[in-house]
Image: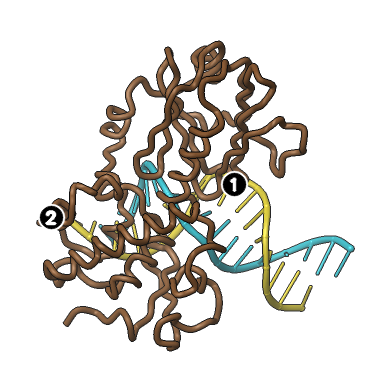
Chain colours: A brown, B yellow, C cyan
Amino acid sequence: MPELPDVETWKRYVESNALHQEISGVRIDASRMLQDVSKAELRRSLEGDRFSSARRHGKYLFVGTERNGWLVLHFGMTGFLSYGSGTEPDPYPPSLVIRFANECRLAGMWPRRLGRISLTSDPAAFVEAKGLGPDALVSGRGADAFVALFRGRGGSLKSALMDQKFLAGLGNVYTDEVLFQARLHPRARLSDLGEADLKRLYNSMRHVLDTAIEREADPERLPGTWLLPHRNRDAGCPRCGGALQRIKIGGRTTYACPACQPMPA
DNA sequence: ACATTGACCTGAGAGC
DNA sequence: TGCTCTCAGGTCAATG
């Protein structure tokens, strides 16, 4: 479930491990994950170049090279990266292996093959072309900008937060967490929410994302008072002890506490 | 405009 | 043990 905090963690991982070394070889075993780029093109762009920076927008990671544009990675449901000497066997067959002159390599693994690998000359243009909304963290332009996003939009709260064209970065799991902490029901209609609700939502979102990033998106390290560690269990609401609701919204399993997250009147 | 559903994909876990 | 089934969920397209 790589969502914004997970991807941010991978971004930092790349920054601290994989920059400034000459790329000596690229192996791709993921034709159907490639988007608008061929294997040959990808190899030609990366080989001999060096990564120099990394950026993130929503759930997309951009790894910039010195000369030939940006590698774009999307982790789908299960994708992850692994940097190292490669002497230990990989847990899954890597779809992407980038070897460096220092004998280490960055491997990308997508056990369920739902990820995306692409190339762009301009991350901002890529984001634009994808129609992605503002990044959920960069919406650090403040609560007012966040609240303004909701003007003129209807529908359910959870659907809006999960819509990457509306706001980029939240997925199923963290959306539930944000709503739980904001004490808002996922099925609440946007039209029923007041400014105070939206500001509270903004604060919860910031808190959830900041905390999760600080803990490297490791579920084991997230506070037990959060909803997240109690998903998929019969455990009750970590706040009131009552039974959690398990419903489907947009085909996604949604957890909520009906007592702590009442529908707006 | 918004919601719902299914396809994509395959590992994990449950149940028998 | 090993088989079968269901579920997980990001994104996209199709349908209501």
Q: Is residue A94 above or below residue A263?
A: above
Residue of label 2? A144
x, y percent for residue A60 = 41, 39
Residue of label 1? A112
Work out whether mark 2 precedes mark 1 in sequence or the reverse, and give the earlier one. Answer: 1
Q: Name the residue rendered at 47%, 69% in the picture.
A: A223
Q: Nearer the viewer, residue B9 or A100?
A: A100
x, y percent for residue A38 = 51, 20
Residue A22 left/right relative to A90 = left
Residue A153 left/right relative to A92 = left
Q: Which callout, 2 or 1, points to the residue nearer the camera?
A: 2
Badge 1: how crowded within 10 Å, few (<14), some, or many (20+)?
Answer: few
Instruction: Classify the position of the C terminus of chain A by image quarter.
Output: bottom left
Residue C4, image quadrant:
bottom right
x, y percent for residue A197 = 18, 70
x, y percent for residue A201 = 24, 65
Q: Amino acid at mark 2?
A: Asp
Q: Are marks 2 and 1 in contact (CB under 8 Å)?
A: no
